[in-house]
Image: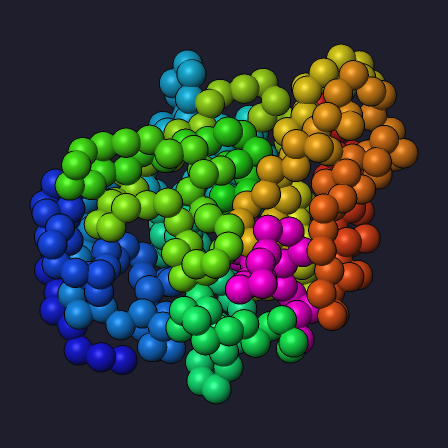
Amino acid sequence: MQTFSYTRAETVEDAVRSVAGAGPRTCFIAGGTTLYDLMKLNLETPNKIVDITGLRDLNHIDAGGHSELVFGALARMSDVAAHPQIADEYPAISESLWRAASQQLRNVATLGGNLLQRTRCVYFRGGEPFACNKRDPGSGCAAQQGNDRGHALLGGSSSCVAVYPGDLAVALVAFDAKIDVLGVTGERTIAVEALHREPGTSPNVETTLKSGELILRVRVPKTTMGRASTYHKIRDRESYAFALASAAVALDMDGDTVRDARIAIGGLATRPWRARAAEQVLAGKTLSQRTARQAGDAALHEAKPGRNNSFRIELGARTVADALMIARQRA
């Protein structure tokens, strides 16, 4: 770990000013559960850290509004997961948080930091001698000819097949959530679905945030579909593990018929992946095991398996189908 300077921001404007013009090696720090990890691996080498933990106006949770849920970027994962109204009215959001990490990490980690966590690709985190275009642009992608069991089947490129590891973002994408960010040019709003980039030829550019922009809050449109929702996560072990496949599902039902469905999948793609083809399969149909599986197959229709991960096409389709049946029981 390299030496760095430290400053503590008193306001959001102060935080953004502290980063503006300071260079690409300046980082915000909140819970630190991602940044410290990456610093110890020398994957992040900041020369300046701006502490935003004192910005109390960013740690609120507001579930009482008429049109949207609002979470400050510094709200803790555990606080949002345990919020009674969220757990009751939007179980997919609550489940996506309490099925992530350990309780100790959830008590510290913030929503903003969680959205921006970086891949768990072993070649990215392993450093030299492994080639990684995300870590060292132009060096190659060791996963392409290596063990790609946990790598992406959707959204990859010849330059990178690293999976986006988060859970919360998948649920937020299913609910058409947005984030508000502040930068030197002012405040703007980004759909969570548009926050993360597919790798293309520039895997090192992971989000659509501009240099120095700070996430202020997450906004989720209120919908009656929230109650009939779930976040279903399949992993190698029951806890403290990242998804081999996951699905966030929300339903609007008329009896056994699907009026509307929202489906997003995680653990299988280079970014949180909205499965609109699967949603279209269900529209106007009776939801049964058969149609749920048809939707699951549609969600993975464009999957491109590598050397060791083709089994996750079947796993992903089943995960979507099982999530749909869980959500149906809650409708």
Chief secondary structure of the magenta portion? loop
Q: Please identify the quarter of the rendering in which residue 229 is found.
A: top right
Identify the residue at the far right of this view: 290
Residue at 77%, 25% in the rendered image: 282
Query: What residue do we see at 74% from left, 70% from top?
Result: 308
* Nearest to the observer: residue 116 or residue 250: 116
Task: Work out whether residue 105 or residue 25 is closer to the camera in this orientation and state it.
Answer: 25
Task: Judge whether residue 318 can be spotted in this image.
Answer: yes
Q: Would you say residue 102 is visible in this rendering?
A: no
160 in the magenta segment: yes
**In the rendered view, does 196 fall on the left or right side of 237?**
left
Asked whether 53 falls inside the magenta stretch, the response is no
Q: Residue 206: x and y, percent?
A: 42, 54
Is 169 situated above or below 331? below
Picture coordinates of residue 13, whole percent (x, y): 12, 41
Question: Where is residue 179 shown, x and y percent of the image?
Answer: 36, 35
The image's colouring method is rainbow
For the C terminus, give its image quadrant: top right
- Tell me what residue is drawn at x 49 percent, y 38 percent: 193
Residue at horizontal 32%, vertical 45%?
209
**x and y percentages locating residue 150 in the rendered image:** 65, 65
Left or right of residue 256, residue 78 in this image: left
Of 51 and 79, nearer the camera is: 51
Which residue is situated farthest in the bottom direction here?
A: 129
**The N terminus: image quadrant:** bottom left
Range of residues picked out in magenta: 147-167
Q: Is residue 162 toward the left or the right of residue 194 in the image?
A: right
Q: For the image shown, how many numbered marks are present on the structure?
A: 0
